[in-house]
Image (cartoon, coloured by chain):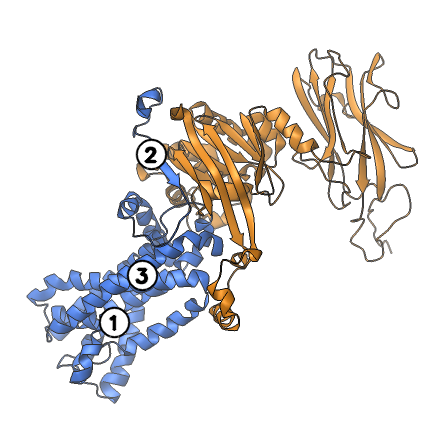
Amino acid sequence: MSLAVELGDHERKDSPIPVTIIKPAKGWAAVDIIELWKHRELLQTFVLRDIKVRYKQTVLGVAWAVIQPFFMMVVFTLFFGRLANVPSEGIPYPLFSYAALLPWTLFAEGITRSTNSMVINANIMTKVYFPRLILPISSIISPLLDFFIAFVILLGMMFYYGYFPTINIILLPAFILLALATSLGVGLWLSALNVQYRDFQYTVPFLIQLWLFASPVVYPSTLVPEPYSTIYGLNPMAGVIEGFRWCLLGTEPPNYLIIVSAIVVVAILISGSFYFRRMEKTFADVV
Amino acid sequence: MSGNIAIKVHNLGKRYSIGEQEKNRTLREAITGAISSPSKWISRKSKDNYFWALKNVSFNVEIGEVVGIIGRNGAGKSTLLKILSRITTPTEGSIELHGRIGSLLEVGTGFHQELTGRENIYLSGAILGMKKLEIDEKFDDIVKFSEIEQFLDTPVKRYSSGMYVRLAFAVAAHLDPEILMIDEVLAVGDVAFQKKCLRKMRDVTSEGRTILFVSHNMNAIENLCDSCIILDKGNLRDYDKDVRKMVNNYIFGNQNDINPSSWMNDGKGFENPWFKPLRFYIGDEFGNRLVMPVSNDSDMWIFIEGEIDEVDISLCLGYALYNENGLLLYWSYHTDVVETDWVKLERGINRLSSKIPKRFLNEGTYRVELIASLHCRQWICEPSVSAPNIFLTIQGGISESPYATQKPGILAPIMDWRLNN
């Protein structure tokens, strides 16, 4: 006789009673995709919460999404474009740098927020169970709203400078996805490490600054001389940024760069998720 | 038959290393630790820095059973709930849970200060495991239950603490997983609202939900639970369906017998229809027996519990308090106040408590006598003749003043002083 029959009196919609087995956790475990999928509503809730909370009690509100990359662009144009005369492959420097700052900001915000996600939500983590992966994942998704708002400004700038997106724009989502994947991969590592060692939250701003100059945001990747450009591809953001420019501004396609970048991202993502899953079991005890 | 089992816990153990509990370990400490004592780093299994928060705990819970978990601080109650709700993993043993699990380990899990009441209902509901559709369905009930309709679109940071708690409870009370773990959350909120929650919880259980309920509140345990687990230093000391017996066990177990601070009817004495005393002890607000000596900076409560078969309006219950020299300090009856304010005694088991305010008595040992009588007609427990005795010992906590660490006199109340010039 099945359990569902025995409990016939109760009007449970989902009649088969789920059985949960709890055992000591040992060693490495893969990501449980099914469980993540079951918690997709929670993911959505966390994303909405982050978005709602972000601009509460600010005067300028959502304008902040634009202000940050826009002023970075102004500063870069002034110092790198005008004073240092950094080449920009024939594209007006403001457009050149802003098109790179968009994926860059998305990436940097994602890392910053996901690194802190576990510690910030410690009170929830110690009180209720859900797949912990939801936290870093939601923290890289929520900056997408800012990204799209800033993107509208980019379209305006392109119009102003007389640039129209090429057909390659259909590949833009792939590059956005790659930026998110990079951000998640790094975020998984850093968030898990940050639970144990709070040093990492101080490292992140510094790391991001270094990474910014290691990525072709203020300069084109063609500036990197030949033997090093292979190694340059190891920075996944190089592929992402050059991909963005290619889709929107019609610069040289990042053929070779993007392959190296994609491989690196997959490696970071897989290793990060395994590390995260391994540490996950102790989060509630340690955080 | 295993089909009736909701929770099966087998040989459960949870070990913490002392180091793991130190918060915010920095990378520097970890690195210097690894360098300065590499052997320790490699053989991290050394047993000396471990303690077992739970050890060899096994029990089964049937579907629809409400299990109270009691034990002193550090007995492992919260650890057990945390493992059962999958927040942390066990070190050994296994658990089988049949049904969806919900846990309620604090009030307002996931509440965000900046968000409105409405937004927080959805947020907290989702975090506690409700589907959006489910929350949509129950939204009106939740709002009604919380009694905060007009503040629904105000950020919760502007709520009074009472409103906050009510809203949080309202969300929690509408959770309906098959298995629910509740940790001590009923200790907050005003009394009327607590009762409402208890009622709601009961409704939940009558629908066949299994509940594990940790509490220090003996009243709540006795009123709500079908069975009871006593944890003691990480071990399961007892698990039985006779909740009363278990609570007795817990309240009256292992105390010194020279000056007992509690008395329990062994079942033979004081047979009468009006009031048969069952328990008489000194406890805290929630009915936990106080361990003697008590510090004078906390209130003490005299608990009198007895069974009434026949309600008699002239029944007077109270106690007499004597000091070490046998001097009677006072008598107190529940009928000392105006008649309309008397507590209403009913048929069945009645549980009265009366507060002895902090910093009223002086340090020392006091004898407390239970008094029960039918006014001007008959003694049930006659002082100095048949009345049960318990002893109250007060030590320390006399005052916050640096000058008044000790006081002469029978009483040591703190009085008000002011300057009138």
Mark 1 residue element: helix
* Chain to which mark 2 belongs: A
Same subunit, tags 2 and 3: yes
Same subunit, tags 1 and 3: yes
Chain B palette colour: orange
Earlier along the polypeptide chain: callout 2 or callout 1?
2
Query: Which mark is on residue A272?
Result: 3
Same subunit, tags 2 and 1: yes
Residue type, label 2 = Pro
Residue type, label 1 = Leu
Circle 1 packing at 10 Å, graded few (<14), some (14-19), many (20+), is many
Earlier along the polypeptide chain: callout 1 or callout 3?
1
Q: Is residue B114 above or below residue B327?
A: below
Which residue position holds label 1? A101
Mark 2 residue element: loop
In this view, the residue in front, B389 or B156, is: B389
